[in-house]
Amino acid sequence: MKAAIIVSTVLGATAWAQDTFTNPLVYQDLPDLEVFRVGDAFYYSAGTMHLSPGATIMKSYDLVNWEMVGHSVPELAFGDDYYMNTTRTAYVGGIWASTLRYRESNGVFYWYGCIDFAQTHIFTASDPAGPWTQHPPLPDCYYDVGLLVDDDDTMYLAYGRYDINVVQLSEDGFSAVRDENVWSDQQTYLEGARFYHINNRYYIWLTRPADGQFVLVSDSPFGPYTRHEILNRMASPIPNAGTPHQGGIVDTPQGDWYYIGFLDAYPAGRMPVMAPLEWDSSGIPRIVTDSSGGWGLTYPVPAIEPAGTVVPTGEFSDDFGGAALHPEWQWNHNPDNSAWALGGEGLVLSTATVTDSLVLARNTLTHRVLGPKSGATFRINVGGMQDGDVSGVAILRDESSFIGLRKSGDSLALFTHHGIVLTEANDWQLTERGQEVATADVELGDVASGAQDIWLRIVADVHPTFGTSNNNNPATFHYSTDGETFTELGPALALHNRWQFFVAFRFGVFNFATTSLGGSIVVKEFDLQLVD
Ligand SMILES: *[C@@H]1O[C@H](CO)[C@@H](O)[C@H](O)[C@H]1NC(C)=O
């Protein structure tokens, strides 16, 4: 998937041999993106809804290899729903399309995002890895907001749907001083604004979800703007995935322009795809297509001499030996930080909730599924489980399943559970708790010694089936008591391809109580591998 730039030295001269990259750029759910450059480094910010921390940041030096380096929103401090400590959950709430840019004058990254159609929240940091600081929100909701830090250091926001507005921010960026409508068309639904100032012209990059891309162009930030079509139902480079759209554009230090959009590729989610841009004589960017006029599956890698290297996201292992969780991880809602810890043998997950359902339990740690098909294996020590505790490994979406263990007295039961459903008509609250579909006896030795490890694995085939009636990619459930020989347990879960939940299927590891708190598990290892 990743194309390395090959350096060849000929008679003392270094030549950059061009290779190609293949779309998607990253075979993971990374939607609603903003992409921008700071010197030699590129940054990519993605929306992450109810997951915490929120708004994943990736970094690259070549636009092709991307490493997850942080999150702009350390805690979704947007109300009790986000903590799962009330009767309501915040599934599909939280961070939708938001914006991240860098301000050179003070060396600060600014993140803005409207939450729950209420206020526009602001976070800043001098390093994407954090720490991030939360500021008092702007009182208005700037829907699908895009930030521009102009050449004269003035900051603007473009936002809206149908009606597109431009806001001028105060010098510190923490209040609005002017807000004007610059475009209105009730016939064409445009949203997902990104804002640029390129060669003395202002560009507001807008999508018509989920199959068109337009740009508004003006000589001044407040207009008047003219609208230009960038793409209209352009053929997708990936079978059974939608048209590339939304996202943003970025230039290389050498002055070449690229467009990174995303496409609906459920059950894999919304994956980024990149294409080169050319500019026509009237200053409108045009996508370089493949020979049949579609978005290319492959293009030459950008002609960049990378100033650094990254550890690209993809296959990923973790022994939880670091001082902090790797940015590849996000909790399902804000965690109870008193109930998890790193250090020693791994990640300790103490039960944080007494509940009868996985999707109501706090402190489930999640990881994106790697497409087109991957297996996630967690090695878990279950010696600290208490009577009534349920722990295990899940595949999570609006239809979730898991393979797990229940402690009853001194005995452990291993089982696969299907049919946990969150329903859109019920504002994505839990409507079906599901049922055990298979059980197995496991011999883990002396429970009281606390020395038992079990390996739980889910293999998920998320190759795109979007827009087709093939709604049945399998996810299968496996366990092992030695880490080598795995046994499948129970029927597969059919991974549906609907978009309405937005967040794609994720792997997760969990531990909740059904009677009382006090138990714990230790997650010792995680291993995510592509599977044929
Ligand atoms: C939920 O947790 C948050 C964060 O700790 C806290 O501010 C809030 O009061 C809690 N709500 C309830 C109902 O316990």
Image: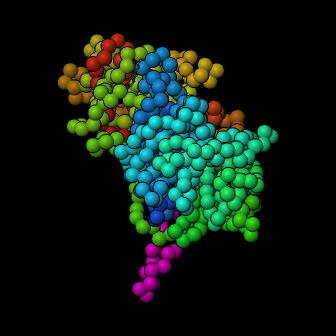
Q: Residue at x 72, y 62 (%)?
A: 284
Task: Tell whether position 422 is magenta.
Answer: no
In the image: residue 431, left or right of residue 295: left
Span highlighted in magenta in the image? 1-25
Q: Quadrant of residue 285?
A: bottom right
Q: Report the front residue among 167 and 26.
A: 167
Q: Name the residue furthest front.
A: 177
Q: Report the front residue among 151 and 89.
A: 151
Ligand 1 appears in which quadrant? top left
Q: Residue at x 50, y 50 (%)?
A: 171
Task: Tell whether position 22 is magenta.
Answer: yes
Residue 18, compared with residue 95, is above or below; it is below
In the image: residue 343, left or right of residue 310: left
In the image: residue 147, left or right of residue 281: left
The picture places residue 187, in percent across and down from the top left corner, at 80, 40
Q: Residue at x 48, y 16 (%)?
A: 87
The picture places residue 457, in percent across and down from the top left corner, at 42, 35
Q: Report the front residue among 217 and 174.
A: 174
Q: Is residue 278 visible from the viewing direction of this image?
A: yes
In the image: residue 13, left or right of residue 503: left
Q: Is residue 271 visible from the viewing direction of this image?
A: no
The picture places residue 450, in percent across and down from the top left corner, at 22, 26
Q: Name the residue furthest right.
A: 187
The picture places residue 143, in percent across and down from the top left corner, at 61, 38
